[in-house]
Image (cartoon, rainbow, N blue to C red):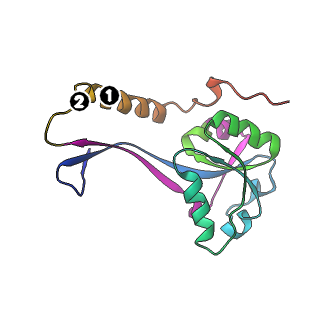
Amino acid sequence: MCIRARNPDIAREQIAAFSAGVFAPANHPLALRPCVGLAELASQRWGVPHSMSISYVFRDAFLNEGLQPPQQVINASNAAHMLELSQRLDLLLIIPKHLAADAVAAGTLIPLDCPALEIPYKVDMLSRRRGTQPLGLPTFRELVRRHFHAVALDQTTTTDRGTARYE
């Protein structure tokens, strides 16, 4: 699906759409709460992805409500490390929902209902409508599309890649 960009010479194609949500280890005190607000979450310790700008959106959600952003104990790009350390350190996580699917299915991670921290995330590809295109662009576009399609279908991406070991 091509979305019209503001510049008529640029085409924007949405490759994938994901959303991030809040998760708690099953033994965390908030795991049994039906809904939690930002004020309560501000006092918690968190694991937040380094990539995808989630850390900025996360921080701004609290600042926009006049709250001090919570402590980000882990700010990493490896979801497997974050999932493991959230269990060991009893941290809340805000991560893309598809990356938490295995742990949710296993019952070790519980999704929390916090609409203020439901963060949509789109992967778009921009290209020129006119002029010379790089020869490999169609192949690259198709590989990126297939990758994100596979990620959306594969809910086992985190545990199958191994986990971190910290002593």
Q: Nearer the viewer, residue 89 or 132?
A: 132
What label sits on residue 134 in the rendered view? 2
Q: Position of residue 146 (x, y in %)?
A: 38, 29
Name the outermost residue toward the left: 130
**Relative to 163, does residue 4 appear above or below in the rendering?**
below
Q: Is residue 110 magenta?
A: yes
Q: Are marks 2 and 1 in contact (CB under 8 Å)?
A: yes
Marks 2 and 1, how far apart at CA: 10 Å
Give the residues drawn in magenta, as a range: 102-128
Q: Amino acid at mark 1?
A: Phe
Q: Is residue 113 magenta?
A: yes
Q: Amino acid at mark 2?
A: Pro
Q: Is residue 148 left or right of residue 156?
A: left
Q: Quadrant of residue 137?
A: top left
Can you identify the residue that label 1 sits on?
140
* Residue found 70% across the figure and 68% down from its top: 68
Query: Which image quadrant: the C terminus?
Result: top right
Q: Position of residue 20 (x, y in %)?
A: 55, 50
Q: Which tag is nearer the camera, tag 2 or tag 1?
A: 2
Q: Is residue 80 left or right of residue 52?
A: right
Q: Position of residue 18 (x, y in %)?
A: 47, 46
Of callouts 2 and 1, which one flags the residue occurring earlier in the amino acid sequence? 2
* Residue found 58% across the figure and 64% down from its top: 60
Q: Is residue 153 left or right of residue 86?
A: left
